[in-house]
Amino acid sequence: MPSEINFGLIFAAAAPSTRLLRPWIPDDSATPGFCSMGRAIISTPKVALQARPMIGPSRVFREAILGHLCLLFRVGPRRSIRVANPLASAAPFQMTSPVVIERDCSRISRIRPFLYLSGVGPLTPQNLQKFSCVINCIAGFRHVVPSHLTVLHIPIEDEENADLTPYWQLVFQTIEANKKVNGKVLIFCGMGISRSPTFVMAYLVCIERMSLLEAYKYIQARRNIICPNIGFFRQLIELEEKITGKRTVSIIEPIAGVEVADVVWNELYDEVMEDLQKKAVGVPSPDSDAK
């Protein structure tokens, strides 16, 4: 991340004359994992984030960053980034493409020939036929599956304080047992963003001895929308250190009141700066509607 910030560029990007695009956000406050956006407040089923005024050039950059943090679909109840007193009044910037989000949420992602990852969207009887086992990572959710399938239920909520420790070995053993008989395992959660990717990352770290950083990037290359909540990231970091004696991912506080895994922050920062540069020169977003 650059040590110097071009505030002239940021001011130009945030100018009222610049067309700012609203990001795609599912608007269903009754559904866990989704968030609603208001004018001066962003609310979720678990948290209300109030706006707070700031002054000076840092306000513009902070608003741009926190606007991303608050409005990005994968923040909110999933807590991939913890924001203290964010500026919900920040001008909304376009970030992750709706096309990518919809594509990944509607498909099953192959991680290994024997290991797949998804949300609930693509769990049709036809799609489930090729699997020998499904691992359900949603508390209180039961899905009717073809009779040939073995089902392992891991009842966890997508919350920072959810303890995954009791389930690591059970998930690993289930995957390995199916692998040995040439079976295929599908592990799923609500959207295939936080819970199920966390277990797949843990498997790659503990069983295949990838670093956590490698595992995150490997899975993300196959399913762009993955982003474990910050509590899950902490447990993955502890697990990696226990297995390998080192840490390749850290929780950082790049802005006062903001905690985030560095691998997520680096990605976020690059996207924010790219978006600001495009807005400064008037380049339209590829997801904007031509009018």
Image (tube, rainbow, N blue to C red):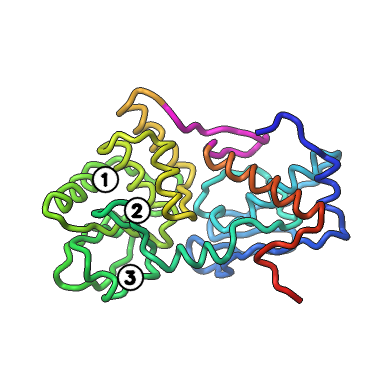
- Distance of mark 2 from mark 3, alpha carbons? 19 Å
Q: Which residue is mark 2?
A: 156
- Distance of mark 1 from mark 2, alpha carbons? 10 Å
- Image check: 204 left or right of 68? left
Residue contact at pointers 1 and 2, CB within 8 angstroms: yes
Name which residue lies at 84% across and 39% down: 57
For the N terminus, the quadrant is top right
The one of 197 and 273 positioned closer to us in this rendering: 273
Name the spot of residue 241 as percent of width and height, x first: 36, 27
The magenta span reads: 247-262
Name which residue lies at 18% across and 47% down: 176
Residue contact at pointers 1 and 3, CB within 8 angstroms: no
Q: Which mark is residue 123?
A: 3
Front of the two marks 1 and 3: 3
- Image check: 89 left or right of 29? right
Q: Hey, what amino acid is under mark 3?
A: Leu
Q: Which mark is residue 167?
A: 1
The residue carrying pointer 2 sits among few (fewer than 14), some (14 to 19) or many (20 or more) residues within 10 Å by Cα, namely some
Whether residue 135 is visible, yes or no, is: yes
Whether residue 138 is visible, yes or no, is: no
Labels 1 and 3: the sequence-earlier one: 3
